């Protein structure tokens, strides 16, 4: 069986078209290996497939700004880098910087594009699991991947969420909406197969995502928890929330 999915090529695309694309997503979890990417939506800072390319100078500025930001990030955390300093490091004016990135949130999201693409590609490949893998195994592998992504990018994710505009911006942003949709379908499949306990799949999904928020992980790291101890503790929490048997994958 081949399942078609309308899917953003990056989570940080313009809000409206991405949300429309997400609404059209039809992802069959047990056939993730057969998913076909049929439509690429516009990526933040890059043209949509049907639009003309950026002017050469605009493209150069975009690249210079992100390169300068990554260089600064190699020296200190994102929260200590101001936009004025970034403009000077990139050799562009403040007006140019803010034309490319209207605020710190949009900058952080652009810096996350590459990591987000890698995560989405792994999901599309079904994490290279055997076609006969059970839903309870798939849900634990997916949760582990989401956890690792959040842990690795916690500082940028937390900064992006802190500067998002709108009361519910964190939950309506395309990257979060995509992750929630994929995880929800995986949870629903596990319950349909009898691998997970019955209940409100939507609420369970929100709890699973909520407990691994970037702010939560950063706090736990500051509190002295090692990454490995967090992985073990979180996997146990996921099993309990899902009602999986103790021997489930993860």
Image (tube, rainbow, N blue to C red):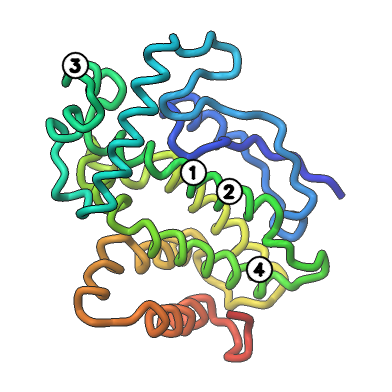
Label 4: which secondary element: helix
Q: Is residue 218 above or below residue 73?
A: below
Residue placed farthest to the right in the image?
Answer: 1
Q: Are dots 4 and 3 in contact, CB under 8 Å?
A: no
The mark that comes first in sequence, 3 or 1, is: 3
Task: Give me the disc on residue 120.
Answer: 2
Q: Which residue is labeled 4 in the image?
A: 138
The residue positioned 53% from the left and 64% from the top of the image is 145
Q: Counting other residues with Cα less than 10 Å from the Cα at mark 1, is it few (<14), some (14-19), or many (20 or more)? A: few
Label 3: which secondary element: helix
Q: How many marks?
A: 4
Task: Give me the disc on residue 114.
Answer: 1
The mark that comes first in sequence, 2 or 3, is: 3
Q: Which residue is labeled 3 in the image?
A: 95
Q: Is residue 234 above or below residue 141?
A: below
Q: Nearer the viewer, residue 65 or 232?
A: 65
The mark that comes first in sequence, 2 or 4, is: 2
Q: Counting other residues with Cα less than 10 Å from the Cα at mark 4, is it few (<14), some (14-19), or many (20 or more)? A: many
The mark that comes first in sequence, 2 or 1, is: 1
Q: Are dots 4 and 1 in contact, CB under 8 Å?
A: no
């Amino acid at each position: 069986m081949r399942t078609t999915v309308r899917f953003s090529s990056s989570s940080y695309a313009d809000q409206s078209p991405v949300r429309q694309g997400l609404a059209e997503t039809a992802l069959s979890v047990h056939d993730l290996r057969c998913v076909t990417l049929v439509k690429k939506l516009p990526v933040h800072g890059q043209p949509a497939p049907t639009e003309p390319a950026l002017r050469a100078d605009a493209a150069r500025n975009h690249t210079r700004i992100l390169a300068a930001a990554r260089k600064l990030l190699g020296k200190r955390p994102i929260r200590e880098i101001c936009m004025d300093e970034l403009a000077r490091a990139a050799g562009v004016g403040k007006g140019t910087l803010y034309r490319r990135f209207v605020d710190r949130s949009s900058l952080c999201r652009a810096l996350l594009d590459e990591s987000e693409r890698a995560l989405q590609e792994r999901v599309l490949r079904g994490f290279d699991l055997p076609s006969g893998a059970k839903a309870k195994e798939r849900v634990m592998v997916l949760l582990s991947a989401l956890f690792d992504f959040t842990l690795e990018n916690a500082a940028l994710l937390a900064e992006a969420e802190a500067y998002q505009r709108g009361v519910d911006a964190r939950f309506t942003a395309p990257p979060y909406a995509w992750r929630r949709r994929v995880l929800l379908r995986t949870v629903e499949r596990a319950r349909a197969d009898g691998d997970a306990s019955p209940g409100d799949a939507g609420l369970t999904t929100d709890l699973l995502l909520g407990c691994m928020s970037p702010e939560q992980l950063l706090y736990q790291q500051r509190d002295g928890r090692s990454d490995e101890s967090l992985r073990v503790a979180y996997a146990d929490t996921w099993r309990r929330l899902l009602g999986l048997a103790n021997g489930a994958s993860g």
